[in-house]
Image (cartoon, rainbow, N blue to C red):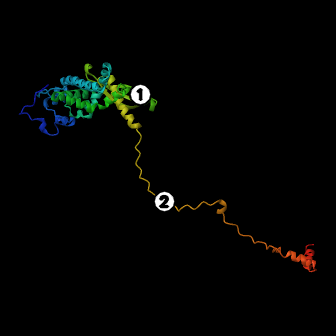
Amino acid sequence: MVDGQAPSRDTPNPREEGQGDPVVALSARLGLVLPDYATALAALTHKSYVNEHRAEEGLTDNERLEFLGDAVIDLAVSHRLMERFPTAREGDLSKMRAAVVDEQGLSEMARALDLGALLRLGRGEELTGGRQKASLLADAMEAVIAAVFVGGGLEPVLGIVDRFLGEAFARAAAGTLDRDFKTQLQEVAQSRLRATPRYRVIAEHGPDHSKTFEVETDLKGEVVGRGAGRSKKDAEQAAAKLALDALARRFSPPEVPELPEPATVTAPEAAPPEPAVSPAAAEPPPAAAPRPRAKRARPAAKRPKRRAAAKEGKGAPARKGRSRKR
């Protein structure tokens, strides 16, 4: 057991208090049984809560668990990187691990679990938006990793790594993990808007040794992202990530409404094709002109007789015909 003792039998067990118990809610969201209840509750307790509830005995904040969780998450991610990249050199593995388990990656894991809603915060931290601070969420996520490790060893931690950091491992395999959010935002802004992102610090919180910076980024005078981090660099990265998400929504193609399928019209059955007819045959035949009455040809057999009749003095009709022609 780490950082705390289990509740005594005389103390009401928060597990039996219903849905308001943060440990029960955390266990449900992780899909894991957290047998060490006191350690899990400490992981969700911020030091600001302990400072404001000094009268309560047995309260422990999550700072020591952050220390253990930082080492455990490094071990789990290192193990997965060794499996996925068996030929990678030490320097490359170290760069990939640093990119996977940075503050941004851990805070995104916490947001995916809605961990901020389960944290026990002091009133001051609550009023300054502590449930949404990337630095506070990253610390709490490390403490939760430690609580999981204390309760079940490395195997359930590897399950959490696979569940929430799978995309980061895929980017590492594709060779795009080292392209940080600021670089990606600059590429998108220049190609889409012909503009360069600008970053400015809008607020600083906390003491000098543990400050949290808030940064916003704008494009052409329009604020497109606002983020927070332990350093200005981390805050700029967080702001660039939110700006990328906003630009992705803006430039995504609009959804095309589905149109009803056109009604199917059945064409009438075509008549069987007629035989091909030449143009000349296709035209109607011209009306037949009246034929001139042809002269009846005289049979050749009678000519010798007529000649013979002429010789005998009977050719008067033939002579009359010649005179008409003249």
Q: CA distance from mark 2 to mark 1?
A: 57 Å
153 relative to 128 in the view: left or right: left
Which residue occupies 32% across, 20% down? 89
- Crowd class of label 1 (few under 14; some 14 to 19; many from 20; radius 10 Å): some
- Residues marked 2 and 1 touching at CB (< 8 Å): no
Q: Which mark is residue 202?
A: none
Residue 175 found in image quarter:
top left
290 relative to 14 in the view: left or right: right
Secondary structure of the residue carrying numbered label 2: loop
Secondary structure of the residue carrying numbered label 1: helix
Ranked by sequence position, the earlier of labels 2 and 1 is 1
* Count of all numbered marks drawn on residues in the image: 2
Residue 183 found in image quarter:
top left
Q: Position of residue 239 (x, y in %)?
A: 34, 29
Can residue 24 be seen by looking at this rendering? yes
- Crowd class of label 2 (few under 14; some 14 to 19; many from 20; radius 10 Å): few
Q: Residue furthest left?
A: 10
Q: Position of residue 293 (x, y in %)?
A: 79, 74
Question: Dot 2 corresponds to which residue?
Answer: 267
- Quadrant housing the C terminus: bottom right
On screen, residue 201 above or below 31: above
Going by the numbered disc 2, the residue's amino acid type is Ala
Q: Position of residue 286 (x, y in %)?
A: 70, 67
- Quadrant housing the N terminus: top left
Residue 139 found in image quarter:
top left
On screen, residue 273 above or below 38: below
Going by the numbered disc 1, the residue's amino acid type is Gln
> In this orientation, which residue lies closer to the viewer: 72 or 132?
72
Question: Dot 1 corresponds to which residue?
Answer: 186
Can residue 122 be seen by looking at this rendering? no
160 relative to 1 in the view: left or right: right
